[in-house]
Image (cartoon, coloured by chain):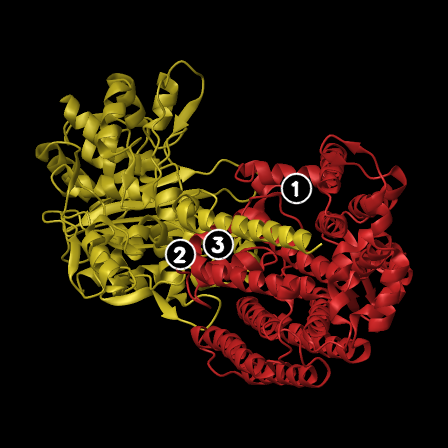
Chain colours: A yellow, B red
Amino acid sequence: MNQAIRNTWIAVMLLFVLSLGALSYVQFFAAKDLNANPLNNRQLFKEFDLPRGAILVDGKPIAESVATDGQFKYQRVYTDPELYSHLTGFYSLANGSTQLESVMNDELTGQSQDQFFDRLVNLFSGKENEGASVELTIDGKLQKFVYGLIPEGTRGTIIVSEPKTGNILAMASKPSYDTNLLAVHSSKQAAANMKKLSDTKDLSPYRNPAIYNLIAPGSTFKIFDMVAALESGQYTADTVLKNPSSVILPGTKTPLKNFYGGNCAAIPEASFAEIVAQSCNTPFVQMSEKLGKAPYEDVTERFGFGQQVKIPLRVEPSVFPPDLNPAQLGQSVIGEFNVRATAMQMNMAAMGIANDGVIMEPNLIKQVIAPDLRVLSENKPKEFSTATSKDIADQVTDLMRGPVKRGTAVRAQVPGLDIAAKTGTSVVPCTTDPCGPPLVNSWITGFAPADDPQVAVTIVFEKIDFKTGSSLTSPNLKKILEAVFNQ
Amino acid sequence: MSELETAPVPRRNMELLLLLLALAVAMGAYYLVGINSDDGLSEEFISQGLILVGLALVFHVVLRIWAKYADPVILPVTVALNGIGLAMIHRIDLAKSDDTAFRQIMWTGVAMVVAMIVLWTIRDHRVLRRFTYIALAASVLLLLLPLIKGLGVEINGARIWVRFFGLSFQPGELAKITLAIFFAGYLSSNRELILLAGRKVGPLQLPRSRDLGPMVVAWLVSIGVLVVQRDLGSSILFFGLFMVMIYVATARVSWIVIGTLMLVGGGTFAYLTMSHVTRRIDGWLNAFDPDIYHAIGGSRQIVEGLFGLANGGLMGTGLGNGSPYMVPLANSDMIVASLGEELGLIGISAIVLLYLILVSRGMRAALGSRDTFGKLLATGFSFTLALQCFVVIGGVTRLIPLTGLTTPFMAAGGSSLLSNWIIVALLLLISHNSRRPMLSGVSATAEVATKAPRRSPGLLESIKEHKR
C-alpha cells in the first residue's frame, strides 16, 4: 500500500512539474508573442500609467497628465477644453483617442523615432519612458478671441493662418465640448458622458468641423474661377462681361439667377473686377461655357482638392466632382451643385493667392520638446503646392480687393489696412417638410495686408439664415484683422 | 516499514518558527500591495493582518494542546498560501474599489475556527470511519442541495451554489471531504475482497463486476455533477479522487486503466453533447480566434489570463504594479494569473512549490499512518489538493481546458476556504496520530494493514479496535 502511495506521489510530482513547465512556457518562452498579440490591450493600459507629454500653446499646457490616486497613475487634464477641444481631441480608455492626442501619440508617449536614443538610455538606467511635449503654432490670445466671435448655438468655424509659413494661428469651431468629460477613467462615466455629448445638436466629439465638414463653398469658389479665367489668357480684370439677371443652364431649361437682392441686378454689363466685387453669378456661368471643365478641374487640384492634407490632423479632401456636364459645371463654378470644401481648403485658397501662388503646407505643430526641454524636432515651413504663378496670384489679389473696397465685403474694411477677400453664400437644400426659413452657408476667406500678407482668415457659418450669416462673416473678419494688427 | 516511523518528537517550536516566517511573507506581500498603491499602512492592513496573525498563533497553540505530534510544516505553508492569497485579493480590491478581502479574512477566520473545532472534537481520525455511510448520504445531500428550488442559485452557468441568509455557499466543496471519508471507509473495509476476487487477463487483474459497483457510482456522481450542475471542475475532481483512492487501496493498475477509459468515454460524450463543455474545449483549442475571444462565454478569460502571465514574465511587475484586474474573475478562478503577473514566473513557481510541499507532507502523513483508513484518507485529501492545483494552473496556462475550480487557500471564496482548512485539520490529525508515541505492544502490528490480504479481516479489525 505504501508503494501505491509513493507511486501516487510520483504522479503528483509529475502534475506539478507539468504545471511549472506550462507556467515557464507562458511566462518566459511565449511571453513576447503574447505581449505582441493584437488582442492584447495591456500596452494601452500601460500608457495610462506613464507620464504622457503635454500639448502646449504659448508654452503653457492645454493638455497634460497629472498624477492621480485612481486606477491609473495619471489623469489627462485639459485647460480651456472648449477652446481647444477640436484640436487636442481627447485621450480616453473607453472611447480611444482623437485629433492631436491620436496623431501625435508616438511623440506624446515617447515612442517616436526622435526619442529612440532616450528610450535606449532609459532601458539601461531603469527610468520610465516619458513622453515628449508638443508645442502648437496656435496663438492662445487669438484662439480665444476668434472662439469668442462664434456665437453659442451657431455652427461656425474660424481659421487664421500665416500664408508665408503655413502655420495655423487659430482654429476654432462651435459647438464645442469639454474634453475632460471623456478623459475620465471610469468607463461607465465615460460612456454616459459620450452619450450626452453625442446627443448634443450638431456636435460630434470625433470630428473637427474645420477639417472635416464638407460645405458647398458658394462664391468663395470664384477664387478658382478667377485663376482659371486669367490663366486662359482670354480675360483680364478689365474685360467687360455681360451680366444678365439670369442665364439658362446649357442644355436645360433651368434658369440660374444672380443672387437675390444684390447689386448685380442694376448692372447689365461690367468689368471683370466689378463682377468679382459684387459677386455676380451669371458672367461666371457664361465663362464656364467658354472655358469647359478642364481648367477648373486643373486649378482646384492644384489648390488641394481631392488631396490628402495633414496638418498633421487628417483633413477631409475637398471635392470638385469629375465628369460634369455643362449645366452641372455652370452650377459648380459658383460653388454649388456637388462641390464641397472644408474651411481648411478655403483657407488654403487664400494662403495660395496671398503667397504668390505657392501654398505652404498648413501646420499646427511648432516643435516637439523632450522632457529635459531639448527640442527634438522643429517644423520648418514646407511647400504644399504651386497653385498658380506669381503674376496670376497678384492679379487675383487685386480682384479680391474689390469686394472689400466697394462690394460684398465692405463691412470688413479696416481703415488703413489693405485687405483682399471673397465672400460666399451657398444655399442649403431643404430637407425638412415643411421647409423652415431658408438657410445658407455663409463664407468669407481672405488675407491682409494684400501687398504683404501676414494672415489668411477663413470664416464659415453653416446652416444659418442669410442675414445672420453675413453679419457674422465680414464684420468678424474686420474684428480679427483689427485684433491681429492691433488697430 | 519501520523506516517510516519518525521518532516521536513534537517539533512544535519548529512549527512556530516557520509560522512566523510564513506570517512575515504574507504580511510583507500585504504591505507591498499597500505601498505600491500609495496606501501604506492602511487600516485594513493593520486590522486584517492582526486577525491573520492572531488566528495562526491560536491555531498553533491548539496544535500544541491537542495534536502535539502533528507535522510542523503543514500549518505554516497553509498560512503562507492563505496570506498571499489575501494580499492579492486586497490588491484586486484596490483596483476595483471592492471589499472582497474583508469577506475573505472573515471566511478565513470561520474556516480556521471550524478547523480547530474539528481538531478538538475528532482527536483521532479513525472515528470518522464509523461514519462511512453517513458520509455517503451527506455527500449526496450536499450535491443535491443546489438543485433544490429556492435554495440553489445558478452563477456563471454552473448550478453549484446555495444561498441562505444572503450568504452563498458551494456545498460541493464540502462534498469532496465527505466523499473522501466514504471512499476511505468503504475501501478500507472491502479492499481484501476487491483484491482477492477477479479474473486475470494478461498482466491485468480485472476486478469482479460487482466490485465495480462503487466505481460506477463514483463515475455516475461525476457525470451527474457535470450534466446536472454543469460543473466540469468538480466532476474531474471527484472522479480523480476516487481513482486514486481505489488505486492506493488495491495497488492495481487495472483500476487506473478502467477509470481512464471511463473518463475518456465520459469526456467525449460530454464534448459531443453538452454545449458548455463544447464551448470550453473550443475556447481552449482556438483561444486566440477573435470570434471565439469575443463570443459570450468565449475564450476572453483564458486569453486575458495568458496576457497577464506574459506581462509578468520572469520577474513579475511587482505587487500592485501590474494590471491583473483586466482578467475576469482575477481574484478567484484566475488568481493564479494575477499572482503570475505581479510576482513573475519566479514568484508563482515558489507558490507552486509551497503547494508541492503541502501535498508531499500530506502524503508523508499517509505513509506514516498506522491504519488503512488513515492512509487512504490522507492520500485522497493530498491528491485533491494537488489535482486542484494542476487543473487550475493547467487551465490558466492553456495546458488543459479551463474549468471552474478554485485555487486552494488563495482564491476568493468561503466554501473553498472552509473545506480546505478542514482538510488541513484532518491531515494534521492523521500526521499527529502517525507520529505520536505508540501504545505498548502495538508497534509490531502497526504496518500490518499493507499486507492485509494475507490475513483475515477479523484479525485486522480486532487489531484496530485494540489500538483505539
Which residue appears at 16% of the width and 27% of the height?
A: A230
Mark 3 / mark 2, whichever is N-terminal: 3
Nearest the camera: A212 or A106? A106
Circles 3 and 1 on the same chain: yes
- Residue, disc 3: B308
The residue type indicated by label 3 comes to Gly
The residue type indicated by label 2 comes to Leu
State which mark lies toward you, 3 or 2.
Answer: 2
Label pair 2/1, CB-CB below 8 angstroms: no
Decide: is A425 above or below B155.
above
- The image quadrant where one finds the N terminus of chain A is bottom right
Decide: is A410 above or below B281.
below
Mark seen at residue B253 = none
Badge 3 sits on which subunit?
B
Label pair 3/1, CB-CB below 8 angstroms: no
- Residue A369 drawn at (x, y percent): 20, 60
Residue that lies at the very extreme toward the top in this rendered image: A251
Give the side of residue B396 with respect to residue B428, left or right.
left
Give the side of residue B240 with respect to residue B54, left or right.
right
- Residue, disc 2: B314
- Residue, disc 1: B280
The residue type indicated by label 1 comes to Arg
Query: Few, some or many C-alpha atoms within 10 Å of disc 2 (few <14, some 14-19, many ≥20)?
Result: many
